[in-house]
């Protein structure tokens, strides 16, 4: 029932604000939102409080996910025959030869600052406002706390992608802000979370699901501390552990699939999610990126997939044959619900569709090359958008982060139980557990690849482990400066203080 209420509220905001499309703004984004003197009703306050949440599907499931996965060694979008070139933008992400004009990088910048603009708008317009005669869904203090947390989260995304970025806390002020060092961005995030965390909801409260909770705030700080050495040169492993230890009330699900099922709203593993509902909140269509055209018949889908994103061969092979997480991939002969073979439509026209693990290269592949990820359950008869709620952070990640920090502190023995619990779930036995000598940093990043495949973390992980510039399938070594995306050309054209 509570999830339905959340869906209804956010879906109304989508309809009122027309936010159902991906907007990449060319104009100056810091002042895109126009302030108003005050909100006149509780409905207006609530609608504007939900606005930043409506941008999560763009900033997180699209922009950050695409840049984070397609620049790494797990996912790829190769050209298949005449399809999938798309101006070369997918090849550029894979080969690390993007430019400031890259469409997806521009989207990651603009859409994230737009979300920050919505937070700033709400915080400005509710400062000192009298709501005593308004009916609000939650207290104004909680709303303002969530907006500050959401703003901090989006500054974390910007820092992770672009490193030194402008911090803007008022609508339109300043008009051409200068970037500040990552250390100052971190200080801003820390101060915001410290000041508002007690006003955030906790797990189990009616207003918590799909909102920024105290656990999400601890997870945000843990992520910042885990990657602190990359951002600033200073390691903060123990502080990462300290924040994770404050996350309570969450457990590992019995099966690895549970956080990603079509009805995953009751999964106690998921810490921070973006709620989606097929007929109420659209926008989650990762399955369309990945499935073959003929999977429309295979799953009786109402719309046709794009046959775009595939599993890189080496990533598929990092899984042991007994690892149940291999079941997240489609490979081999494909069939419809009645057991009839699906057929190819391009290079394999009228032939049985057999998805191969191996792929020729990014520029010359076929429609049937590459395994496909269905980590998020695809329900037979699915409409355009998935019902699954998108998982930003889950408790398994918290445990793996703690284990990594312990290993880096020389406490591998303390890390073993956390990683082995996750391994035991994946293998349904203890036969593949690590020991003190086998749990190395190289094995940890491989285990993160297995557990968090296609979840949007891979670029960050590769950078933290010093492997982002390395070689993998159809990708040569790249320079260290590729670890940071350039400011988009539209941003530098509009702000003279931004320079690549």
Image (spheres, grey):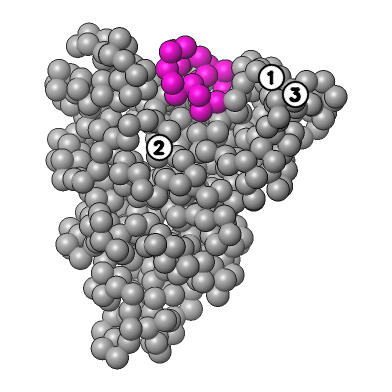
Instruction: Indicate whether 305 appears above or below 407.
Output: below
Residue 265 location, x and y as percent? 39, 50
Residue 153 location, x and y as percent? 34, 54
> Which residue lies under the disc numbered 1?
333
User: Horizontal placement of 304 versus 326: left or right?
Assistant: right
Q: How far apart are marks 2 and 3 (CA)?
A: 29 Å
Mark 2 Cα shell of 10 Å, populated few (<14), some (14-19), many (≥20)? many
> Which residue lies under the disc numbered 2?
258
Judging depth in this view, the residue of 439 and 210 nearest the camera is 210
Q: Which residue is drawn at 37% across and 22% down?
A: 426
Residue 138 location, x and y as percent? 29, 73
Return the disc, 1 or 3, that comes first in the chain's sequence.
Answer: 1
> Which residue lies under the disc numbered 3?
341
Based on the picture, tell me whether residue 314 belongs to the magenta stretch. yes
The answer, for residue 485, to whether it is visible in the render is: no
Return the disc, 2 or 3, that comes first in the chain's sequence.
Answer: 2
Q: Which residue is drawn at 33% across and 79% down?
A: 136
The answer, for residue 337, to whether it is visible in the render is: yes
Return the disc, 2 or 1, that comes first in the chain's sequence.
Answer: 2
Mark 1 touching mark 3, by CB under 8 A? yes
Judging depth in this view, the residue of 358 and 498 nearest the camera is 358
Q: What stretch is highlighted in magenta?
A: 311-329
- Please, which residue is most extreme toward the right here? 350
Q: Nearer the viewer, mark 1 or mark 3?
A: 3
Q: Which residue is drawn at 29% across and 80% down?
A: 127
Q: Where, by quadrant of the figure, is residue 346 drawn?
A: top right
User: Horizontal placement of 282 versus 273: left or right?
Assistant: right
Mark 2 touching mark 3, by CB under 8 A? no
User: Horizontal placement of 23 versus 324: left or right?
Assistant: right
Mark 1 Cα shell of 10 Å, populated few (<14), some (14-19), many (≥20)? some
Mark 3 Cα shell of 10 Å, populated few (<14), some (14-19), many (≥20)? some
Instruction: Indicate whether 384 appears above or below 54.
Output: above
């Amino acid at each position: 029932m509570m999830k339905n209420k959340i869906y209804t509220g956010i879906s109304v905001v989508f309809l009122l604000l027309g936010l159902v499309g991906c907007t990449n703004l060319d104009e100056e984004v810091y002042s895109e939102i126009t302030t108003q003197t005050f909100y006149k009703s509780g409905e207006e306050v609530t609608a504007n409080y939900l606005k930043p949440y409506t941008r999560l599907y763009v900033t997180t499931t699209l922009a950050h996910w695409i840049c984070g996965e397609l620049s790494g060694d797990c996912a790829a979008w190769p050209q298949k025959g005449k399809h999938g070139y798309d101006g070369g933008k997918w090849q550029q992400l894979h080969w690390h030869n993007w430019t400031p004009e890259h469409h997806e990088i521009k989207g990651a910048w603009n859409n994230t600052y737009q979300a920050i603009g919505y937070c700033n708008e709400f915080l400005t317009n509710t400062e000192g406002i009298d709501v005593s005669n308004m009916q609000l869904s939650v207290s104004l203090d909680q709303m303002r706390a969530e907006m500050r947390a959401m703003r901090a989260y989006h500054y974390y995304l910007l820092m992770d992608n672009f490193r030194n970025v402008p911090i803007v806390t008022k609508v339109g002020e300043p008009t051409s802000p200068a970037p500040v060092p990552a250390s100052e961005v971190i200080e801003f995030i820390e101060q915001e979370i410290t000041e508002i965390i007690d006003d955030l909801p906790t797990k189990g409260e009616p207003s918590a699901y799909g909102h920024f909770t105290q656990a999400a705030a601890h997870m945000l700080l843990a992520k910042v501390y885990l990657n602190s050495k990359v951002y600033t040169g200073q390691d903060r492993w123990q502080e990462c552990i300290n924040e994770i230890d404050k996350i309570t009330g969450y457990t590992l699900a019995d099966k690895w699939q549970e956080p990603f099922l079509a009805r995953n709203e009751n999964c106690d593993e998921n810490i921070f999610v973006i709620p989606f509902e097929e007929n109420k909140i659209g926008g989650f269509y990762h399955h369309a990126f990945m499935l073959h055209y003929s999977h429309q018949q295979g799953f009786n889908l109402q719309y046709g997939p794009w046959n775009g994103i595939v599993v890189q061969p080496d990533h598929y092979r990092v899984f042991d044959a007994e690892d149940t997480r291999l079941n997240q991939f489609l490979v081999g002969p494909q069939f419809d619900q009645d057991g009839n073979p699906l057929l190819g439509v391009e290079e394999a026209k009228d032939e049985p569709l057999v998805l191969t693990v191996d792929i020729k290269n990014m520029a010359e592949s076929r429609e049937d090359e590459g395994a496909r990820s269905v980590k998020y359950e695809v329900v037979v008869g699915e409409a355009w958008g998935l019902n699954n709620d998108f998982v930003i952070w889950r408790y398994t990640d918290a445990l793996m982060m703690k284990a990594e920090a312990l290993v880096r502190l020389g406490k591998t023995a303390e890390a073993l139980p956390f990683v082995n619990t996750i391994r035991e779930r994946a293998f349904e036995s203890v036969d593949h557990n690590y020991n003190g000598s086998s749990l190395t940093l190289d094995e940890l990043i491989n285990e993160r690849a297995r557990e968090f495949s296609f979840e949007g973390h891979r670029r960050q992980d590769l950078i933290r482990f010093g492997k982002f510039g390395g070689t993998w399938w159809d990708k040569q070594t790249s320079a260290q400066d590729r670890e940071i995306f350039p400011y988009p050309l539209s941003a530098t054209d509009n702000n003279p203080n931004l320079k690549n």
